[in-house]
Image: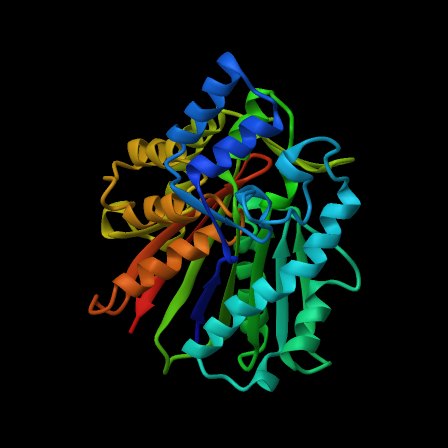
Amino acid sequence: MKSAITAIGTALPSYRLPRAIVAESHVVALRAEGALETRIKAIHRASGIQTRYSVIPDFLQNGHDPSLFSKGFTDPFPGTDARMEVYRRTALPLAKQAVSQAFEQRNLPRESITHVVIVSCTGMYAPGLDIDLVTSLGLSANVHRTAINFMGCYGAFPAMKVANAFCKSDPKAKVLIVCVELCSLHFQQATDEDTLLAMALFGDGAAALLVESAEDQPRLEMEAFHTGLAPEGHNDMAWKIGDLGFEMKLSSYVPKVIEGGIAPLTQGLMQALDMELDQVNHFAIHPGGRSILQAIEAQLSLSPAQNHHAYEVLKECGNMSSPTVLFVLQRVWNAMQGAESGAPILSFAFGPGLTLESSLFTYHP
């Protein structure tokens, strides 16, 4: 019996941020004028993002009291401690929204959950989000807990591999995966190109999966995973903990690195399954940015229509780091009603290292 995803829940914070609002906040924070203001607004326009979401009202400014950044993003910017305090206060409610949606789809008794896997790269504390979820959801105190931190946008893939291993070792295992990222807490004032790009892309969100060995439920069976590493991109995508929050580096060279690595990655996965890429018609690709999606399409001969769900998630939510690919996978699954049982779905995500992750799922109604 194969391990399978039997439910996907997603959640967005209540503060919806139109692109122009975020761009203007960026301009104000940097006191940008002239060429820099023009550059910031151009990066935001080119992002493919129309809206994103935040757990804090600060970006909306008018009519909202700031909860983290000073009014108008003037100095001083908050330190890491203040940002982590907001994470600790707001991550749990958002995570629980995603979990509740997952349980609505798959009506499991809460006490049947045997494992909880938490994924986050935008906040850490101890006792952590894993324990807070167990107690607030009323899960068993004996549930096995695992935390996957600081892996960035591909973090959902190690979590799914861990869940797959749990289910293979114990067919009765029922694993709850929760990815929650509050990227907006790490808004920075730096003017280098990498930071400008990162600040134009990232928003907040959460996703939850239920993974179990099941044959009598609608599900996405986990067929295989394959990992690649492109060391030449080691310095092009990175997180580090700074005095003023977590500092992200996202180079404009990242799409080129992914472009060079995506074909070998796909080939390795297909060979492991004795399949050809032309047998796959459904794709759940992490929308790390519009240029990344276009680079993958060029290398794998995909059309933008085949990548439609990734573009829509990027447009509506921005890049939320680890939950983002699960937002895409949820939409792909929902759109497959009526598809043939066993239809394959190819999924990718990318992160620091530069790491390339792939997986193949099969749809079973």
Q: Nearer the viewer, residue 40 or 140?
A: 40
- Give the farthest residue toward the front: 63
> Is residue 132 toward the left or the right of residue 153 in the image?
right
- In the drawing, does residue 313 fall left or right of residue 209? left
The reply, left or right, for residue 322 in relation to residue 70 is left
- Residue 257 coordinates in the image, percent (x, y): 47, 28
Q: Nearer the viewer, residue 301 or 137?
A: 137
Viewer-proximal residue among 11 and 207: 11
Residue furthest top as drawn: 35
Residue 42 sits above or below residue 15 on the image:
above
- In the rendered view of the protein, which quadrant contains the N terminus? bottom left
- Residue at (62, 35) in percent of width and height: 72
Residue shown at 50% from the left, 37% from the top: 22
Residue at 79% from the left image edge and 64% from the top image edge: 127
Which residue is rendered at x = 63% and y = 59% of the image? Answer: 91
Q: Position of residue 108 (x, y in %)?
A: 50, 84
**Residue 364 against residue 353 in the figure, above or below:** below
Q: Residue 78's quadrant in the figure? A: top right
Locate residue 196, reporting x and y percent.
55, 27
Q: How many marks?
A: 0
Query: Considering the image in quadrants, where does the C terminus appear?
Result: bottom left
The type of colouring in the image is rainbow
Please say if 176 is above or below 26: below
- The answer to whether one can see residue 360 in this image is no
Residue 184 in view in this figure: yes
Residue 312: x and y, percent? 33, 47
